[in-house]
Amino acid sequence: MCGIVGVLDYTARNPIPLNREQAIVTVDSLVHRGPDDGGLMLMPGIMLGHRRLSILDVSQDGHQPMIDQQTGCALVYNGEIYNFQELRDDLLQAGHRFHSTTDTEVLLRGYLEWGQKVVTRLNGMFAFAMYDPRDSSLWLVRDGVGIKPLFVHDDGTRCWFASEIKAILTALPSLARMDRQAIDRFLAFGYTPAPRTGFERIEQLRPGEAWTIRRGFPIVKSKWYRVPYPDKIASCTLEDASNRLGCALDSAVKRQMVSDVPVGAMLSGGLDSSAIVRSMQRTGGGRIESFSAGFTESSFDERSFASQVAQRYQSQHQEVTLLADAQRGLHCLVSHAEEPLADNSALPLYFLSEFMRKSVTVALNGDGADELLAGYDTYRASQIAPYYRCLPKWIRERVLQPAIEWLPNSVAKYNTKMMLGRFMSFAGYDAPHDHAMWRSMVPPELRKQLFQGSFLDDSNDPWLDYTSVLEEAPDGLLPLEKQLHMDLRFHLPNGLLVKTDRMSMAHGLEVRVPWLDHEVIAACLAMPAKWKRQGSDGKRVLKQLLSSDLPKSITHRRKAGFVIPLEAWMRSSWQPLLRFHLNERFAEETGMFRWPFLLKMMDDQRDGKADHAYSLYTLLILSIWWDTWITGRTPPICNRPKNWQPVQITDGSSAPSGNR
């Protein structure tokens, strides 16, 4: 995994506005993503920069920018191509010669052989920039699922790109201005959906999107990826579906364990990560290292389950405990997330990644299984909601909803009062809008009381963005399949994968996601929906797969989620932190919130009169983000590894890659 940055002047009238020293500083703002090597190509009208985390062929043969001697085509690339060996064989047969064993060179030579169609042959996670001097073009590409990020700023004459926003802001600090519409969506979901970022003039490529930028021509934006739905769902038994899934996952894990540096696994004790460790054992690749994080609060701690799984699959297991004083990591979280990100599991993931990096450089995790196999309780809620809507409105509003207030308050994970309250708040919306509403961080009724002035007037219905991804879905999907499509194309790339990339790469840890391998996605999409969920029974096919290995206490326990004890911490130990950041100055500076109501939210949370924990956490993250990235009151923190290598500069006239 790496970090890339660059700029192309596509008018041929303006020189690149950076000298070598400034360009190096811009590249080195990404040093945490790639401490092992740095490269810079700075030529008239084009700059390409790269920070390398050496995974395959750790020698200098993998240095980037990688430039073809014959054509001058230059590549900077972040990610992993898991089928690179097969593609390399095809290219060798076509007459290409290789000077390294990297997937980077395979991508470069694949472009020379197949042009832009090379992207349709790739199975992996990636974001890259390919500069072709033959037509003075820059080709920017993001992987189809959205695992790796790619940010851009286009001012009409130059197009900047980078793996992280901080690299663009290092070169153009004046761009640190808040995008109010993006923040409106952040307050709805806890993240800023692509193409927005939270910054007014910085956007990001959507998953499966490519930009072609040529001097003298308008920028061409295209979508190259389509979700691989089958023409027809094949009839099969649960056992058949389980066997096919197991084979696909084994193949994916085997591909993704290819590395010249140590590989480990994030193990929560849940089904998704347990299946990954199972496949790692089945590859026969030697000792498995697994890692988990836990809490002192018993209802949030899953380490006992993780230990059982580690023992069953004979992994060398390590654990770390997270305490309430983990609040010290919030500034680090905001600094490395860059976009406002209120997924509270980002905090333990940040510390777990830091812990793991001491032992391994690559980690496999279970992201994506819930969105493919209907693991969330929200799918059950969407099944029940139509029956709830059949009740007379007066019963819902005057009897059932007020009755929730009589339930005892609790700080336990997924407590009954919280779950029922959220269900009744959102189940009144028609499908598929109701499914989008389950993701609410600051829900509509609270927004009306909290927002003020023009921000309230300008706020529309951000949840329509969530449902809009159904426009690309095929006809004939069942209601559950529509919900899965929305989560796969919206929630996963905009929220979960952002969290995983930023928190792991803050420590130079590469996280791979076998559940999002092309073969696994295809296997999941091809099976009948009933093998994913029936009623409250989710991930049925995965339970079947693991049933012969693991006890029911693991395979059939309720999904827990890697979240912190937010309700308890917000009520007690984090109250001083809340009041320090969510103050009257913040409300006045942003001009978005009613200070008296914001103060009441904090008081009610402290006194147990209401549970605003998730909304307050979202506002807390926004306040820290505001001070870190917009006002500069608290400068961002960048983790700098101790032994990182300096940038090497090339003028583009020589290169390490071979000729055809």
Image (tube, helix red, strand yellow):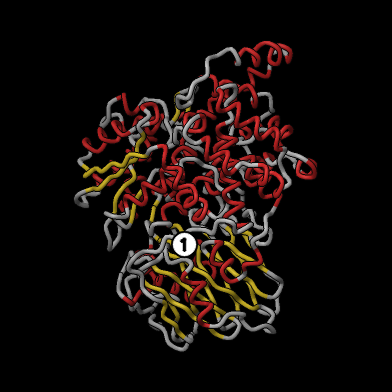
Left or right: 367, with 316 as reference point: right
Q: Which residue is at a point 39% across and 48% down the rendered structure image?
A: 514
133 or 60, nearer to the observer: 60
Residue with the mark numbered 1: 121
> Taking 467 as reference, is 628 above or below it?
below
Label 1 Cα crowd, 10 Å radius (few <14 / some 14-19 / many 20+): some
- Disc 1 secondary structure class: helix
Q: Which residue is at a point 36% across and 73% down the rendered structure image?
A: 645
- Report the residue that reaches farthest toward the bottom: 653
634 or 312, nearer to the observer: 634
Give the image location of residue 462, x and y in percent.
69, 41
Give the image location of residue 629, x and y in percent.
59, 57
Q: Quadrant of the C terminus?
A: bottom left
Q: Which quarter of the picture shows residue 179?
A: bottom right
Q: Which quarter of the picture shows residue 464?
A: top right
Residue 89 seen by the camera: no
